[in-house]
Amino acid sequence: MTESSESEWQSGEKSGLVSIGTHKLFASIAGPTRKAGDPLVVVVTGLGSSIRSWPAVLRGCSRFARIMAYDRTGLGRSEKAPTPSPRTGQAIAEELSALLKAMHLEPPYVLVAQSYGGILARMFVAQRPKDIVGLCLLDTNQERTYIDRPIDHELLGIMMSGINYSEVIGIKKNDKFSDEEWETMAKGGDDDGEYAGLEIQDFMSSADALAAHKQFEHQVLGNYPVSVVKANTIRELNAILQAATEKGNGTEEQRAQVAKEFGTFDAADEILQREQLRLSSQSRLHVAESSGHNVQIYEPDVVVNEIKWIMDCQPKT
């Protein structure tokens, strides 16, 4: 693919591979042509996740704002890097900068992040604080998540053995997705596992690197709007534990340990989600009781409404 022209991604709806020098990333963009100073909405997906679960949000948001979503290296429809490299938050944020430059998409930006994407998005903020004019954080991890709300993922893996995750937690097709979109999302990516694993390896070091920036203390977004959406994730975790118990996964002691972790999860999670309100003097919390962790699937309209609020809060020119 030849280098993107300056006008190629500025108007209309378009998807394709974009070269960032070493390899190509898959990007998709839609929405009205930006006027000078209009923010670009940028989606930052969760750990090891592609943009396949985001079509309803992209469609809804594109009615009032230009929005770009992309697959990180080795995920979804993006290429793998020619040589292995750390998948730290800092490296991923730099990769996003390279992509935006290659697409000739200038700031300002509003970042919409889900799960681990919250750490990645805020590392991008750390690198380019003057270019960010809003954050929408969807049930995101933050710098203290693995400390204050720990989950033994090895034990969780034992609980999940032989269990259909989507079926157990109740992810069902809704009218915001076409049949084709739902099928594509359910199929996932054949090669996502390798790079998801690489991101997991750097999860804690990326969280520690973010903590060093002290964004809460510095109220890094100033007066720019921040929306925090807390999902009802504990509902999914309890469903997994029930299914594991019925299937006889793990020992009785292991299931008791998981139950103990889950017992303190929701209270700790609410504290962690609320702390992110400190990123700005203009922030709000939305509790999505009907949503599991992937709010963009369960309630895409909630996500679109929060993005709309952020856009409406922008200074009028």
Image: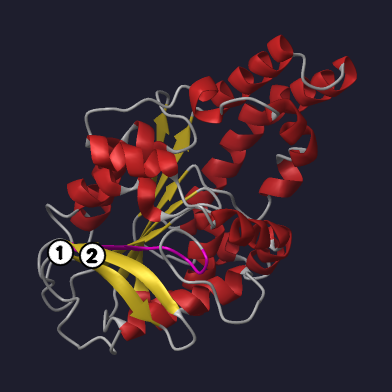
Residue beneath disc 1: 13
- Residue 262 location (% of width, % of height): 70, 25
Q: CA distance from mark 1 to mark 2?
A: 6 Å
Q: Earlier in the sequence, mark 1 or mark 2?
A: 1
Furthest residue in direction front, as rendered: 190
Q: In the image, 157: left or right of 52? A: right
Residue 288 visible to the viewer: yes
Name which residue type carries label 2: Ile
Give yes or no for residue 252 being in the magenta stretch: no
Residue holding disc 2: 29
Q: Residues within 10 Å of mark 1 (few under 14, many from 20)?
A: some
Q: Quadrant of residue 192?
A: bottom right
> Residue 67 or 52: which is nearer the viewer?
52
Where residue 82 sits in the image (x, y, percent)?
Answer: 57, 81
Q: Are marks 1 and 2 in contact (CB under 8 Å)?
A: yes
Part of the protein shown in magenta: 66-74
Do we see residue 177 in this rendering? no
**Residue under the image location 16 percent in, 76 percent down:** 10
Residue at screen point 37% across, 45% down: 53
